[in-house]
Image: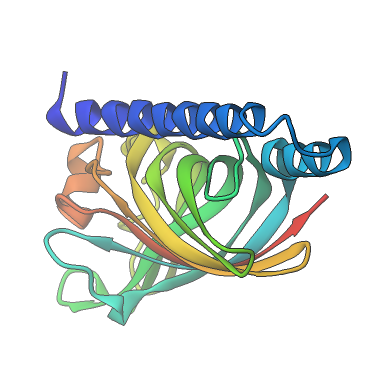
Amino acid sequence: MHSKSKFLIVSFLLIFLLGVIANLAIAQDTSSTTYTTTTTTETETARTSTARAGIKGGLNVSNLYVDDVDDENARFGFNVGLYAQLFSSEVFAIQPELLYSTKGTRTTYDDLVMGEGDAKFNLNYLEVPVLAVIKLGDAAELHFGPYWSYLLSANIDVDGDTDSFDELDRDNFRSWDFGIAGGVGLNFGSTQIGVRYSKGLRKLENSDEAEALVGDAKNSCAQLYIAFSM
């Protein structure tokens, strides 16, 4: 198995294990204080063990990178979907998400063969991050963990003199992508506003034509989002 795939699987298992340990620790702590009043115990148990779910969406600023990320040719898009917090305690939770997320890049070309123009690479994914949540009190959260995504569609919009990109579509790019993500969220009651950055670990090209255009490029994406708990 590829070393990067192993890394993501181990990351997921560690996050899951941390969630189980945190949940067991909270349960043990709750059971050890059964001598307190019934009202206090019920309130604490409800507050520490209740799962949370909601909707979220926001702005994507994406690009493709080889060695270093360059935001000069960023593509602006969006993300929207659902999230939940499981194994939730006062300090930790596991947050899986299901998102529709647009990625890609834009580039300007100017040569004798293709002429002049602009090309926008549009890659649209169904994305599943599974994140560890470190709670900094009630005000803020840190998020980090792996993500997996499935390429739903791909196309290239060209504003220029060439039709060299016309034959490129979803079949020229890998169906599955994976990587790591991290960010911070600020809580305002049942609303959270946050930023996140994700970095793909898999090459996108799946054909000689795509490789000629994007080389060994991988996804990178910065997000600004708002989430509403239901």
Task: Tell me the quarter of the picture where residue 190 sits.
Answer: bottom right
Decide which of 124, 101 is in the foreground and name it.
Answer: 101
User: Which residue does the image show at 24% across and 41% down from the upper left?
Assistant: 202
**Is 53 situated above or below 156?**
above
Q: Seen from this angle, which residue lies furthest top?
A: 1
Asked whether residue 23 appears in the rendered view, the answer is yes
Decide which of 68, 212 is in the foreground and name it.
Answer: 68
Apparent side of residue 165 relative to residue 26 in the rendered image (left or right): left
Task: Tell me the quarter of the picture where residue 104 sits.
Answer: bottom left
Q: Quadrant of the N terminus?
A: top left
Residue 5, position in %: x, y? 24, 28
Decide which of 202, 173 is in the foreground and name it.
Answer: 202
User: Which residue does the image show at 60% across and 66% down from the upper left?
Assistant: 225
User: Which residue does the image show at 30% across and 77% down from the upper left?
Assistant: 71
Q: Seen from this angle, which residue lies furthest right?
A: 39
Asked whether residue 116 appears in the rendered view, the answer is no
Task: Tell me the quarter of the picture where residue 209 sits.
Answer: top left
**Is 222 situated above or below 204?**
below
Apparent side of residue 121 relative to residue 59 in the rendered image (left or right): left
Residue 94, position in %: x, y? 53, 39
User: Which residue does the image show at 56% across and 27% down from the upper left?
Assistant: 28
Residue 126, position in %: x, y? 54, 40
